[in-house]
Image (cartoon, grey):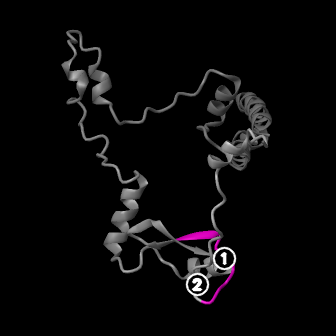
């Protein structure tokens, strides 16, 4: 009696290779290895094409064909949230938000509610660059070109030759030169 192959029963459970899918283009006998949706409302139902015919199909196929401009816009808006419902943000006006429900007898949070939505102006840092920008009368952000233009303007105004040799103008020019050097190094 011949022994049975112990692995033969596994062949029944092994994944089978699918039959070769032919290209769905009439008259084409090539293998259909690329899928393309049949219609906008049947995106999970596919044609199977060879590479040449799928390229041709994709060039001609328009998902939005037959839709009005408003329908296209609506579809785009829905698809940005994966067709899930969404609600507008920021519909609560200042003073009506959840902070109003907090017991705040000293009014610590009043300032925050009143200034909600406002952009606070940044104060320059107490760094060498911040002080140098203040000397030159510049507010960040500024470019190297803007720095050079402001420097030339101040040098012409405060140069001792333009001020009759005034010592105060000379000292002011020194501080302008130092500030310019600091900011030029910072921006370079």
Position of 104 with respect to 126 (left or right) is left
Q: Position of residue 105 (x, y in %)?
A: 20, 9
What residue is disc 2 on?
25
The image shows residue 130, relative to residue 159, as above or below, that is above
Answer whether labels 1 and 2 touch (C-beta < 8 Å).
yes
Residue situated in front as seen by the camera: 113 or 64: 64
The image shows residue 115, relative to residue 104, as above or below, that is below
Q: Position of residue 73 (x, y in %)?
A: 36, 67
Q: Position of residue 75 (x, y in %)?
A: 36, 64
Disc 2 element = loop
Residue drawn at x 68%, y 75% is 31
What residue is disc 1 on?
50
Question: From this viewpoint, which residue is outermost toward the bottom?
Answer: 27
Q: Which residues are magenta?
A: 27-36
Whichever of labels 1 and 2 marks the residue nearer the N terminus, that label is 2
The picture quadrant where one finds residue 144 is top right
Residue situated in front as seen by the camera: 64 or 178: 64
The picture quadrant where one finds residue 113 is top left
Around disc 2, counting alpha carbons within 10 Å, would you say few (fewer than 14), some (14 to 19), or many (20 or more)?
some
Question: From this viewpoint, which residue is outermost toward the top?
Answer: 105
Q: Is residue 35 magenta?
A: yes
Q: Position of residue 16 (x, y in %)?
A: 65, 56
Residue drawn at x 63%, y 69% is 34
Disc 1 element = loop
Quadrant position of the C terminus in the picture: top right
Q: Is residue 170 magenta?
A: no
Residue drawn at x 69%, y 47% is 153
The picture quadrant where one finds residue 151 is top right
Q: CA distance from mark 1 to mark 2?
A: 8 Å
Residue drawn at x 23%, y 37% is 93
Residue situated in front as seen by the camera: 98 or 180: 98
Position of 42 with respect to 15 (left or right) is left
């Amino acid at each position: 009696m011949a022994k049975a192959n112990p692995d033969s029963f596994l062949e029944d459970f092994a994944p089978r290779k699918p039959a070769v899918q032919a290209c769905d283009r009439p008259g084409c006998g090539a293998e259909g290895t690329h899928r393309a949706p049949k219609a906008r409302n049947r995106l999970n139902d596919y044609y199977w094409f060879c590479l040449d015919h799928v390229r041709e199909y994709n060039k001609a196929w328009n998902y939005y064909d037959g839709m009005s401009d408003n329908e296209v816009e609506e579809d785009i808006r829905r698809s940005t949230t994966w067709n899930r419902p969404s609600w507008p943000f920021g519909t609560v006006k200042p003073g009506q938000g959840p902070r109003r429900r907090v017991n705040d007898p000293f009014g610590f949070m009043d300032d925050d509610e009143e200034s909600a939505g406002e952009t606070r102006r940044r104060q320059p840092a107490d760094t060498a660059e911040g002080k140098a920008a203040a000397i030159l009368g510049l507010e960040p952000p500024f470019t190297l070109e803007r720095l050079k233009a402001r420097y030339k303007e101040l040098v012409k105004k405060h140069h001792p030759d333009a001020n009759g040799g005034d010592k105060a103008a000379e000292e002011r020019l020194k501080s302008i030169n130092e500030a310019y050097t600091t900011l030029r190094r910072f921006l370079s």
